[in-house]
Amino acid sequence: MSTAKQLPRWADLILLPLVGLAAALLLSAGIIALLGESPTQAMKLMVDGAFGSQDSIGYSLFYATNFIFTGLAVAVAFHAGLFNIGGEGQAYIGGLGSGLVCLWLGNWPFWAVLPIAIAGGAGFGAAWAFLPGWLQAKRGSHIVITTIMFNFIASALMTYLLVNVLIKPGQQSPETREFASGTWMPFAHEMLARVGLNFTSTPLNFAFVLAVLASIFVWLFIWRTRWGYALRVVGQSHDAAVYAGISPARITIMAMSLSGALAGCLGLNELMGSQHRVLIDFPGGAGFVGIAVALMGRNHPLGIFLAAVLFGALYQGGSQLTFDMPRINRDMVVVIQGLVILSCGALENMFRQPLTVLIGRRSVSPARKS
Amino acid sequence: MAVEPRQSSTKAAALELRGIDKRFGPVHANRSISFSVAAGSIHGLIGENGAGKSTVMNIVYGFHRADSGQIFVNGQAVEIHSPQQAIAAGIGMVHQHFMLVENFTVLENVVLGVEGGALLAGGLAKARADLTQLGSDYGLDVPLDAVVGDLPVGLQQRVEILKALYRGAAILILDEPTAVLTPQEADQFFRMLARLREQGKTVLLVTHKLREIMAITDRVTVMRQGAVVAEVETKSTSPRELAEKMVGRAVLLNVEKGPAKPGVALLSVNGLEVRDDRGVARVKHADFEIRSGEIVGIAGVAGNGQSELLEALSGMRTPSRGGIMFSGYDLVAEKFDPRARRALGLAHVPEDRLRVGVVTGFAARANLILGYQDRPAFNRGWFFNDQAITADCAQKMSTYDVRPPIPDLRISAFSGGNQQKLVIAREVDCDPKVLLVGQPTRGVDIGAIEFIHRRLVALRDAGKGVLLVSVELDEILGLADRILVMAGGEIVGELTRAEATEEKIGLLMAGVKGGTHE
């Protein structure tokens, strides 16, 4: 009976996240003021640092690329009713897959290596997510617990491999040799130069295009295919799925594998696009940021794209901030990110209520007529 | 708040509502509800699902707060903002779904929340004495030390009533109390209500069953679309008149149908045993068949294995023993899942519409392909054929008179009756050979019931087989050509429509004839 009034779709998808973001920035401004710096100056520096120049835009979008992949990974699992917290580990292992392909096929032409590297990254990531998926489907081990555990296992495994097996002989730091330059992702500035456009040299690379393609793929898959439909049915109602002849166990495994495959693509950007080697802890928390990105982007590819760009900008603008304001250090950026997550996720319902009332009041009379 | 002692000339009203108004967003659930319940009477509150009965009760019991209006108890204006305040005002409520702790004893359940001290022993001893007294006063004998989970539903209901009386309730609100009872248990229950009335208690009986209103109440208030549309002496009204007031137009209480022409057996069940998730055999042994051109009804008190039988037939649950022959296949041996069974022509309208039959978060059109999402008609290569899906939905909405006919509207925004029409449309429109139907009219308004019943009869007349599982005996008697009665997981009797009476079925339901009633 208690049909609570709902927000219009546009407000739910766009306005609410923006209000959350504004609240988070306001809080951050307060903290910056407490630290004795000017909040307006800080915000200006951040925005400038994120979008002020070609250089900063390139970096912002480079970081955003990582977050798009991990955000999509969280969203796909979420639509199947699964909370995949293992994006970090899946990205880590997926990167190993792409890295191995690049190390082995170094003398192949790039466009021949690319599909295999994608398959390697997606395949390794999928395999790493398949196991928790299988354990959930067949053994009932909760996915949240197992994926967290698998993050640690991935980390330990990669440390072992990089220290003992894949390390470039004769060096101290645990990383592989550099990939042959033929396997590097084309940089954005290189590609733009080819069509006569000038762009500063940044790590932004072709993987950004792949991330956009992945977003489109996820959108098509989730909402336009019968497999995505089955996945959403399982996510919404286990019983309705059984009734419809959809096996929740099979869908759980499929969704987790797809989720892991998307997370596993992070290496395409971070390794093939920028680092050009496999090194310790290269995902750098992007797997976890992906959770925030998916949350803020409402698990919709377009929202995820926008949220990823926002987080990329925060990341890049934040680093800029720490350069220029000595009293603000790297952790402040993490605090701001945390506040965004807090206000867009946890505090969402706090804003939802007043917004609903506000919008409802304004649009009640025309809506009544229909 | 001005206290206004308003004594009516004849008998003081135990409970009086004046101008109770309540909105949930755009839904005007209660429009200025006013009625009074005379002390020491049994008052019926009747209306279709969604008429606002539950909202009124929840306001009286303090779950919701009215936007405006007043509640008077024994002529005194009272403010009720929580169940605690309702109890303090002498109002007790027995919910449709019992609020009992199954692994506590009766005594423990009754004192729960009113233990009267940090140590249990004293409170329990006092409660035991009080309850024995209450039990003998009202003829409510319940074994105080039995574990509630072991008691039959009828007794559990008594525990609920005792609980309310123990808390000092002078006014009892009963919400659909007979939903879980056999007809005989219901009769017993009514005798108990009469006894309560003799002892001066006031009863407000909320139900959608006309029969009960006629059988037991003194006065009846009829609600429709959030408003009180009539208040009459029960003696001076008839079921037909009440039904018309509930719906707002003349209704057919029983669908007209010709004699059945049963043909060949379409589906046969042999020695079926079905266990639930905990491994308990819920269907112990079932043998029957469904022929073309007949409606087979399965009667029984809820929870006697009908649900599990339906799940096993539809493929949602794997039977532990036995076979189901359909279209030349043994569905059990071949391990056909629900999708494969649909493809063979075995459609299923599930008992629990909202949990199983639809995905509440999806639009109507997305729900109309549930289970049929792989059909070529709905797909174009790898992708959905959106136009075809929407067109199909729009066509079914018009054929089945679904309102509003908006394919993109969320299924949860439709009324229960329209949701059920959509489910029936989905399952019937694919031309099944046999249709399994569970509780087709649960939570469905009278107007839609009529429509749904006609559809089922039309399906039968088209030479299909229909298996109808319903706990509404009226529905079974109105539709079925052959009636199987289930009790304790077994089919304890089979009756043709001609020989079936409510009495006979009731006795079988209670497991009197060879049944093992738990």
Image (tube, coloured by chain):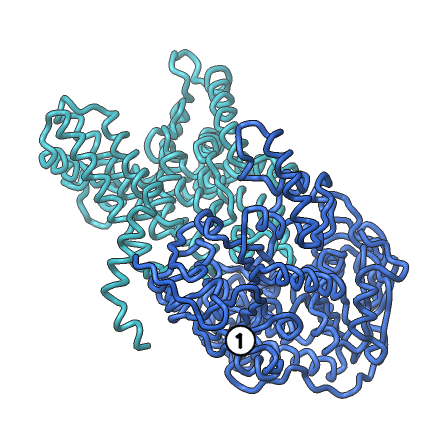
Chain colours: A cyan, B blue
A45 relative position to B348: left or right: left
Residue B205 at what x, y percent from top left? Answer: 58, 65
Residue A142 at what x, y percent from top left? Answer: 56, 36
- Image point (68%, 66%), residue name: B438
Of all residues, the one furthest to the front in this rendering is B9
Name the residue type under label 1: Asp
> Please, is residue B512 above or below residue A20 in the view?
below
Read off the residue under disc 1: B392
- Image point (53%, 28%), residue name: B118
- Residue A267, can we see it? yes
> Please, is residue A194 above or below residue B59 in the view?
above
Viewer-nearest residue: A217 or B436:
B436
- Residue B179, can we see it? no
- Image point (33%, 63%), residue name: B68
B516 relative position to A257: left or right: right
Kind of element beneath mark 1? helix
> Please, is residue B313 above or below residue B122 in the view?
below
Residue A183 at what x, y percent from top left? Answer: 39, 35
Characterize the local packing of mark 1: few (<14), some (14-19) or many (20 or more) Cα atoms within 10 angstroms.
some
Residue B13 at what x, y percent from top left? Answer: 47, 66
- Give the total of numbered labels: 1
- Image point (37%, 50%), residue name: A298
Q: Can you tell which quarter of the image residue A52 is in?
A: top left
Viewer-nearest residue: B100 or B272:
B100
| Chain designation of label 1 | B
Viewer-nearest residue: A101 or A1:
A1
Q: Quadrant of the N terminus of chain B?
A: bottom left
B273 relative position to B408: left or right: right
